[in-house]
Image (cartoon, rainbow, N blue to C red):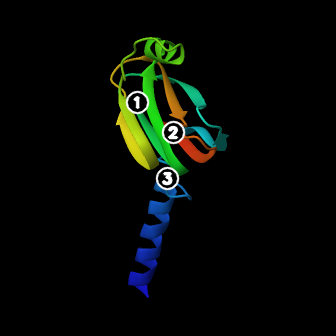
Amino acid sequence: MRYRLQVMLLLGALIFLLGANGYTCINETILVNEVVNLSSGSHRAYPINCKNGNRLRIYINANSGINFYLFDETNYNEWATYQTYYYHYILAEGIRKLDEIYTIYSDGTYRTVIYNPTDASIEVSITLGLIT
């Protein structure tokens, strides 16, 4: 009986630290948690203000392949206006699922972008969290 109680207390503490949904970290702020429908060729950008050492948790689930980008503000503006740009941190093309934590190495505003490169609409569930 005592062993069972200890296990239950340990599991309770673990659930508290991770969050009830299993994704939230104790020092995490959920910035985006939504389901969006992206029409063909469209994108959605989310601005995020980060500090050096912050970590960005990215969880994406789509019903078809999408592209995901993480840009600094300058490169996002160049990408959005069809100029030459540089994938500042992350590029993932044709993905249906993404579950990553990325460490930010410089203060600034970043843009996370989900883009639909297909000829059909795509439903995307996206959660972005900032871990400080």
Q: Determine whether 13 is above or below 60 in the image.
A: below
Drawn side of residue 17 relative to residue 31, left or right: left
The quarter of the rendered structure image containing the C terminus is: top left
Q: Nearer the viewer, residue 113 or 132?
A: 113
Q: Nearer the viewer, residue 68 or 8?
A: 68
* Amino acid, disc 1: Asn
Residue beneath the point at 66% across and 42% down: 36
Work out whether mark 2 precedes mark 1 in sequence or the reverse, and give the earlier one.
1
* Amino acid, disc 3: Tyr
Q: CA distance from mark 3 to mark 2?
A: 9 Å
Crowding at mark 1 (Cα within 10 Å: few <14, some 14-19, many 20+): some
Crowding at mark 3 (Cα within 10 Å: few <14, some 14-19, many 20+): some
Q: Position of residue 108 (x, y in %)?
A: 45, 16
* Amino acid, disc 2: Gly
Q: Nearer the viewer, residue 27 or 129?
A: 129
State if disc 2 and disc 3 touch (CB < 8 Å): yes
Location of residue 104 (image quadrant): top left
Residue beneath the point at 50% across and 58% down: 22
> Tag 2, which secondary structure?
strand
Q: Position of residue 91 (x, y in %)?
A: 38, 33
Circle 1 is placed at which residue position? 54
Drawn side of residue 103 relative to residue 130, left or right: left
> Tag 1, which secondary structure?
loop
- Figure label count: 3
